[in-house]
Amino acid sequence: MTSNADTLRRASLEVLRAEAQDELGSVVTERLHGGEDPWAFMDELPTIDELVVLLLRADLFDAEGGRRPGTDYARDRRMLGEIADAYPGLRGTIDGMLARLDRLRWSS
């Protein structure tokens, strides 16, 4: 059985950032093709590093048997801490996300 640390160390931060950039580009393109005004939605989108954190967090949920995220702040803090430990380059982003954990869309 793999640990959460093993799950997180599958790719370099540079690769994860490139994947997140591609994903955000796809989201922007889709919304533009849908006729949305970029000035209306660009502030809603996560940064590249925030998206990397969210994707890693999703991997951790999968590694824990696919349990859905809930209102468990302790679990969110633990997972974000594990991500920060595995990817120190994301620590500043994670600190910012933790500071506004109760206001983030993905937290219930």
Image (spheres, rainbow, N blue to C red):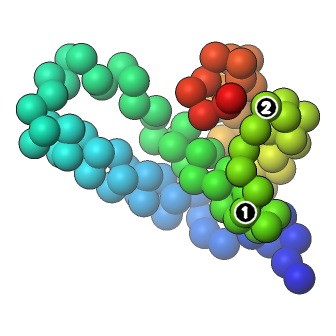
Instruction: Please state the horizontal and vertical placement of residue 62, each as a whole percent of the image.
Output: 71, 65
User: Is 86 left, or right, of 58 in this rendering?
Assistant: right
Measuring 41% from the left and 57% from the top, which residue is drawn there?
Answer: 18
Q: Is residue 63 visible?
A: yes
> How far apart are labels 2 and 1 at the CA level?
16 Å
Name the residue nearer the viewer: 1 or 88. 1
| Quarter in which the C terminus is drawn | top right
Q: Is residue 92 visible?
A: no
Instruction: Please state the horizontal and vertical placement of residue 6, each as a whole percent of the image.
Output: 80, 72
Badge 1: residue crowd in 10 Å (few <14, some 14–19, many ≥20): few
Residue topped by disc 1: 66
N-term-proximal mark, 2 vs 1: 1
Measuring 71% from the left and 23% from the top, which residue is drawn there?
Answer: 101
The reply to whether discs 2 and 1 touch (Cβ–Cβ < 8 Å) is no
Numbered circles on residues, count? 2
Residue 37 position by quadrant: top left
Name the residue nearer the viewer: 11 or 101. 101
Instruction: Please state the horizontal and vertical placement of residue 27, each as a whole percent of the image.
Output: 29, 45
- Could you tell me the amino acid type at mark 2? Thr
Instruction: Please state the horizontal and vertical placement of residue 67, each as a whole percent of the image.
Output: 76, 56
Q: Assign a secondary structure to mark 2.
A: loop
Residue 6 — which label?
A: none
Residue 91 position by quadrant: top right
User: Is 53 left, or right, of 71 in this rendering?
Assistant: left
Residue 12 versus residue 24 in the image, above or below: below
